[in-house]
Image: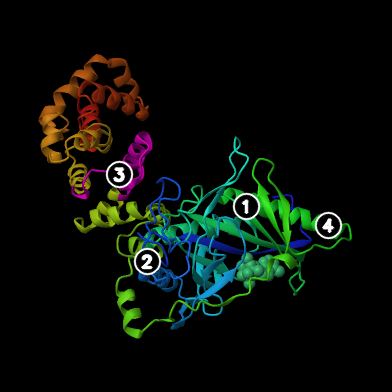
Amino acid sequence: MSKNGISEKYEIVIGLEVHAQLRTQSKAYSGDSTEFGVAPNSNVSVLTIAHPGTLPRFNEKVLEYAVKMGIACGSEITRYNVFDRKNYFYPDLPKGYQITQDKTPICRGGAIRITLPSGQEKDIALTRIHMEEDAGKSLHLAEELDTLVDLNRAGVPLIEIVTDPILRTPEEAYWYLTEVRRLVRYLDICDGNMEEGSMRCDANISVRLKGETAFRTRVEVKNMNSFRNVERAIIFEAKRQIEAYEAGETIKGETRMFDAPTGSTYSLRNKESLNDYRYFCEPDLQPVIVSEEYLTAIKSQMPALPRELKEKFINQYGLSDYDANVLVDIKETALYFDEVCKSLSTPAQYKAAANWLTVPVKSYLNEQAIGMEEFTLPASKIVELVKLVESNQVSFSIAAQNLFPALIADPTAKAEEKAKELDLIQTSDIDAITPIIDEILAAYPAKVAEYRAGKKGIIGMFMGELRRKTQNKVDPKTASSLIEKRLEEV
Ligand code: ADP
Ligand code: MG
């Protein structure tokens, strides 16, 4: 048994389909707004519901975002794109079809590299990425007999990112989704919130005996609203299929729904009744041609991606792999750090800046329950803090505890002036510290004797006293060597 209680005899085969809702202002094939949270059915013109006589018009932003994703994944970009109608009946699809891409997905191939917690890396090969539109939403309210339909989402652009059947563990699926979310956020093409439905995942799952070369029948599982639930669904489904095979049964190709409260899946429909979408070329839209110039222009607009930034942080700023990983986890933090480093020049300063972001800034954001995008202190203030601590004028702990919040409250103030104003400047002035040390040594003759008898550790107690007497405003290096010196001399 492996750690998830899955028999070691079997291997799980997983392919994921991720729908990412694109952050465009208008819909994929009409000028209707994509604004979220407005009154139901208020972003719905005759175009969204394809009344007779209306013609769809392609939103070029959709192409731009899809191409950006393809470039980020190293996919081949399709130059001649046609749209297709995928026909099916559903109350939240008043057109009776979805405009999608069947034969000519905008991106083919490419891969997304994931890093597992063990540090092991794996390239998750992509089959394709295609552009399509979302359907509306059916609402089954408890107090209503009828199903309500909100068409605001109908026509909102999506890209569907499809992997090869190459994932092998629930954990890999989890880290793949984490990486997809990070990529779309760095590219600024989707907000990546799975809980809110702007990123959705269907998992195709089959199992086979280890060493077997052919794939077995897959089951498609829908309705997971978090990465954890995708993992749970895969674990449940793998166990269910293994049990069936062990009992001599077969698995039928079907679509199943995940039920979060029980962590189980149940059958929705079988594949036979599912697959007749009668795809045909969308007659109302012209083919979209991606020219060389267009591709070059989009390539030149690509933002820095997490892997590139991580390498830069390691190679250029000398950070550890661990620190670099923590910093690139969230785009806004990575860019902020990079901004801070532009005004710094030594590895020690870069490391100090990394500490500022990963410790005090991070705890401040946690306390305030805000994200880095809402952090108001300008990067130049972190630069000032790094330099102030480096020059021994303020200790890091005092700067983090007192000066940092004071600067957040008064961000136009200079860090050094604020430190003076708050009386936080520490002294490394020997003439000022020596009398205080002598006072302490005089007050504890027994301890001094112990020190002289060889109990060198007692120096920590003297340091503590000094810190208390000076409100922690002595430079610790100067102070400890001075205490040692006085202990030898006095
Ligand atoms: P459909 O349109 O029916 O969903 P696709 O060709 O789009 O079919 O494939 C969907 C997903 O199923 C892909 O991610 C693919 O990797 C995955 N897949 C295909 N065969 C298997 C299998 N035997 N086991 C697990 N996943 C599979
Ligand atoms: Mg599918």
Q: Earlier in the sequence, mark 4 or mark 1?
A: 1
- Element on which disc 4 rests: helix
Q: Is residue 429 visible?
A: no
Mark 4 and mark 2: span between their CA atoms? Answer: 45 Å
Q: Secondary structure at mark 2?
A: helix
CA distance for labels 4 and 1 = 20 Å
Question: In the image shown, does 384 or 187 lie closer to the viewer?
Answer: 187
| Magenta-highlighted residues | 354-380
Indicate the position of residue 278 as horizontal and vertical percent values: 63, 74
Q: Is residue 440 left or right of residue 247?
A: left
Tell me the quadrant of the picture where the C terminus can be found: top left
Question: Which residue is at 30% across, 56% downward?
Answer: 335
Q: Nearer the viewer, mark 2 or mark 1?
A: 1
Task: Identify the residue position indicated by label 4 in the image.
Answer: 244
* Drawn side of residue 449 relative to residue 83, left or right: left
**Neighbour tally class for label 3: few under 14, some 14-19, many 20 plus, Cα within 10 Å:** few
Q: Which is nearer the N-term, disc 2 or disc 1?
A: 1
User: Residue 231 bears which disc, if any?
Assistant: 1
Do callouts 2 and 1 mark residues in contact (Cβ within 8 Å)? no
Instruction: Find numbered disc 1 in the image and state the secondary structure of the residue it sits on.
Output: helix
Quadrant for residue 27, please give it. Answer: bottom left
Q: Residue furthest right?
A: 248
Q: Which mark is residue 374?
A: 3
Q: Earlier in the sequence, mark 4 or mark 2?
A: 4
Kindly report which numbered mark, 4 or 2, lies closer to the viewer in this rendering.
Answer: 4
| Protein image colouring | rainbow
Specify the amino acid type for callout 2. Answer: Glu
Disc 2 target residue: 308
Residue 344 percent location from the top left of the image: 21, 55
